[in-house]
Amino acid sequence: MSESRFTPRVFSGIKPSGGLTLGNYLGAIKRFVQTQDAGTHETIYCVVDLHAITVWQDPAELKSATREVAAGFIASGVDPERSVLFNQSQVSQHAELAWIFNCVARVGWMDRMTQFKEKAGKNAEKQSLGLYAYPSLMAADILLYHATHVPVGEDQKQHVELTRDIAAKFNHDYKVDFFPMAEPVIEGPAMRVMNLRDGTKKMSKSGESDMERINMTDDADTIAKKLQKARTDAAPLPETLEGLDGRPEARNLVDIYAALADIPPAEVLARYPGAGWGTFKPALAELAVEKLAPISREMARLMDDPAEIDRLLARGAERAREIAAPVLRETYEIVGLLRG
Ligand code: AQP
């Protein structure tokens, strides 16, 4: 199948399941802005609120988190004119295409999804059906726009691969060349920012303790305190990257520094050869505050005018529907669903 007939187009999203973390920023938003600014692809960015409700969300908090994620996008540099920026539930075609994909994807495919296993833990039977079917909705999010590239953190790679499986099965079953093979784009030193208290776990919005993550809205003192208390081993920084093997917490802090400073991790070690944590942690805190403070200030300013955020999202949704509606219409036609 020739992929060149598809317009180079990026789609990615973030769940408003809480406030944004440094993981979301480095693994997703910062790269969304770089892609938009490079100008080589159309860029579509979405606050995926339908994904958020796969686990319980307080309705008032969900609205506020949706605006906060939108504010985080804009404050970081996503331009609602140059990119299409909206919240998923305003474009009903996402849910409609997801249903069709529920009928294409196989139960065995969902059973292999590690994120469901991690999130459900021992309580899989008690999880919502939505959490189990989440990857099918994510495939719809991407394929509704015929997106060719999907920038994500490492944790979402398997879901983008499943999106390709769904596209391939749909094309095969209906004997069409309709959905593109979207590629995950996973590059840079911070594709998996780890929890500050346990370097083997991912930093998450919904993690139990606030001390395990840096929130985009944290003030300078809080950022410094969290990094100061971040768990590490006792050894100083090594001179080469191999010296970080088996030291997940140390590796994480070096990777965060590298991603914030836009330099390779080896260069961080070259800047701080053999440094102890008493030197490196304050330097990292200073850098994090320097990069994050302007964004959190701008987020606060935007959050002061929720009506303006709502207006921007509604306008973005209108633009998204212009792309999505013809794709869904053609999908219905291919599947044989009558439309008046
Ligand atoms: N720790 C992370 N490191 C790198 N990238 C990350 N992303 C999330 N956490 C990290 C990337 O951010 C994008 C949006 O993710 P999401 O909010 O839709 O879902 P998630 O990965 O489940 O995020 P959280 O923070 O862990 O949310 P909760 O706690 O609610 O489940 C994705 O591109 C993701 O890779």
Image: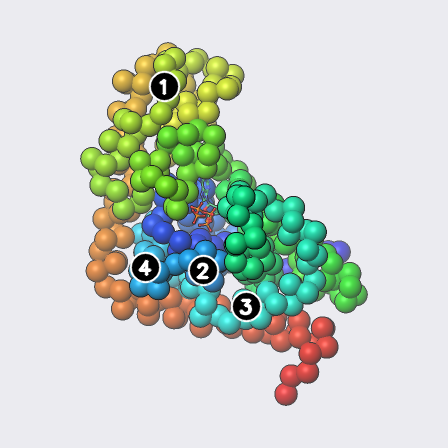
Instruction: Look at the picture and state if 70 lies above or below 190.
Output: below
Of label 2 and label 1, which has the lower sequence position? 2
Residue at the far bottom in the pictured view: 340
Instruction: Look at the picture and state if 332 lies above or below 255.
Output: below
User: Is there a contact, CB below 8 Å, between mark 3 and mark 1?
Assistant: no
Q: Amino acid at mark 1?
A: Arg
User: Is there a contact, CB below 8 Å, between mark 2 and mark 3?
Assistant: no
Residue 194 location, quadrant: top left
Q: Residue at x 26, y 64 (%)?
A: 306
Q: Amino acid at mark 3?
A: Ala
Q: Residue at x 70, y 51 (%)?
A: 108
Of label 1 and label 4, which has the lower sequence position? 4
Q: Which residue bears the numbered disc 3?
A: 95
In this rendering, the label closer to the viewer, 2 or 3 = 2
Q: Which residue bears the numbered disc 2?
A: 53
Q: Is mark 3 within 8 Å of ligand 1?
A: no
In this rendering, the label closer to the viewer, 4 or 3 = 4
Q: Residues within 10 Å of mark 4 (few under 14, many from 20)?
A: some
- Kindly state the secondary structure of the residue where label 4 is placed: helix
- Mark-to-mark CA distance, 2 and 4: 11 Å
Q: Residues within 10 Å of mark 2 (few under 14, many from 20)?
A: some
Of label 2 and label 3, which has the lower sequence position? 2
